[in-house]
Image: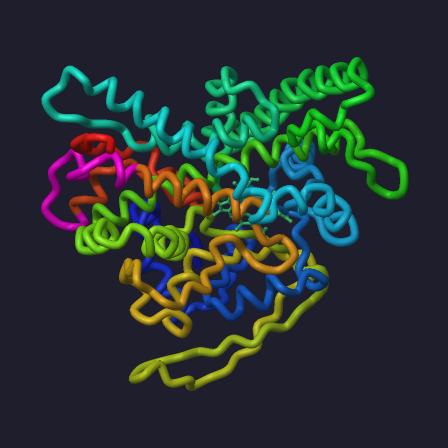
Amino acid sequence: MEIYPPVEQRFSPFDFYSLMRKNNPIVFDEENERWGVYRYDDIEKILRDHSSFSSKFGPLDLPLGIPPEYEENIHRPSLINSDPPYHRKLRSIVDTLFVPIEISKLAPRIENIVNELIDKIIEQNSNTATSTMDLISDFAYPLPAIVIAELLGVPFEDRDTYHQWADVIVGLEENSNIDYIKKVSKTFDEMDVYFSKLIEERKKSSSSTKDNDDDDDTLISRIIRAKVDEDSSLSEREILTFSHLLLNAGHITTVNLIGNSIFSLLENPQELKKLQENKNSLIKPTIEETLRYRSPVQLVIRIANDDVTLSEKKEEGVGGREIEKQEIKIKKGQKIILFLGSANHDESIFTDPERFDINRKNLRHMAFGTGIHFCLGAPLARLEGQIALRTILERFDNLQFDFDYSDRQDLYTKVTPLKSSLFLGLSHLPIRFQTKNRQ
Ligand code: HEM
């Protein structure tokens, strides 16, 4: 049974997930040899049980049977694909840096970046009758890329290079061919070379300013300086892998949060109107509703550490009455795909889940996962999303799609979704707007 949403539904896989939750909530894909899990409660249970379900083969969803050297290069041990106690050791290095109170200090800088990007867009339109932009390439991509580059200490001038790396990673699919896998593995090698040089420079500059090397508070330098296990530091390879992860996780995902929020508001003009009338109180809930409705990361992966039995409740007919309970046996070593995007539309948790509703009260979404691997960057992604949305509404009026469409199905054919089952987002989003006078 096919466990991934059909390609043409990738940007709005709601109907597919709804059928899976109803008819095949935990199902084995014989061809790709992996389980698909769709209901909120089952996914939450698995994510909270890290001793039975390992993270060792995440976060990228690789096809079956690829040569081990590529698999090992792509799935090298890192924070996101390790289990305790190693996971705890790595997480303790960065945990305190990403707490909301620390992240909130970045707000003024993020506001500056957002306003500079908007100034540039307005300037590009200064001689045109109708103002337009590609929301993704002109705004949603550069914002998180600049923020994470500054935090890490990666020169933003190199953005074209890491944009290319990000595109290769985003293009990876569960059925990518071997040539594509080689390309991903080569991308990891290129990132190693790039970060090795950067780490070397950081080490040199901190040894030449020995007395005040704590002044260099870029993330890479903090990771280099971090002491783990009494007195030892991370190895060169561990520092490299940590840097890759933060750079990639820090921008690929947040681009989609920003793009998906604007798309979903334009698709639901009544919600946009509500938001414009209540900016102060509704910006945060709109970002949370976007995370739930069009979750930027659609799935996470676990491997069974042992044989495990899960019980699946089958529901049918009037009122979703439970009629049958079935035991599902997952074998040691089997791969399990947990569809967060489906959990976030589960009708047993969210009322009227297929409605984009910025007044929604229940915001228990799992867009950032749950359990020990809960997204490290959640406070940062939320802050960037909120500032981006608020500033767009403050500086632009009359936002509209810059293309004609007659109904929803037609609308989906006019945009270019990412070709990914892991990330849900758009590669382009043309919009029209009017510039407001700044007070
Ligand atoms: C809207 C934006 C984002 C979404 C939807 C998102 C989603 C997720 C999810 C679902 C996980 C859990 C993975 C798992 O359980 O296997 C995760 C983990 C992680 N995320 Fe994010 N993320 C976002 C932004 C960021 C940002 C800005 C950073 C940058 C610092 C970041 C860094 C990480 C890291 C390092 C982990 C691994 C944490 C661990 O394993 O302990 N993420 N993210």
Residue at (25, 18) in percent of width and height: 123
Q: What stretch is highlighted in magenta?
A: 392-409
Q: Residue 278 magenta-drawn?
A: no
Residue 294 in view (yes/no): no
Placement of the C terminus among the 4 image quadrants: top left
Relative depth, front residue between 142 and 301:
142
Residue 114 vs 330, above or below: the answer is: above
Residue 405 in view (yes/no): yes
Residue at (48, 20) in percent of width and height: 159
Placement of the N terminus among the 4 image quadrants: bottom left
Q: Picture coordinates of residue 413 (x, y %)?
A: 21, 41
Q: Is residue 177 left or right of residue 55?
A: left
Residue at (41, 71) in percent of width and height: 349
Q: Picture coordinates of residue 415 (x, y %)?
A: 25, 38
> Looking at the image, which residue sits at the far front?
439
Q: Picture coordinates of residue 231 (x, y %)?
A: 89, 37
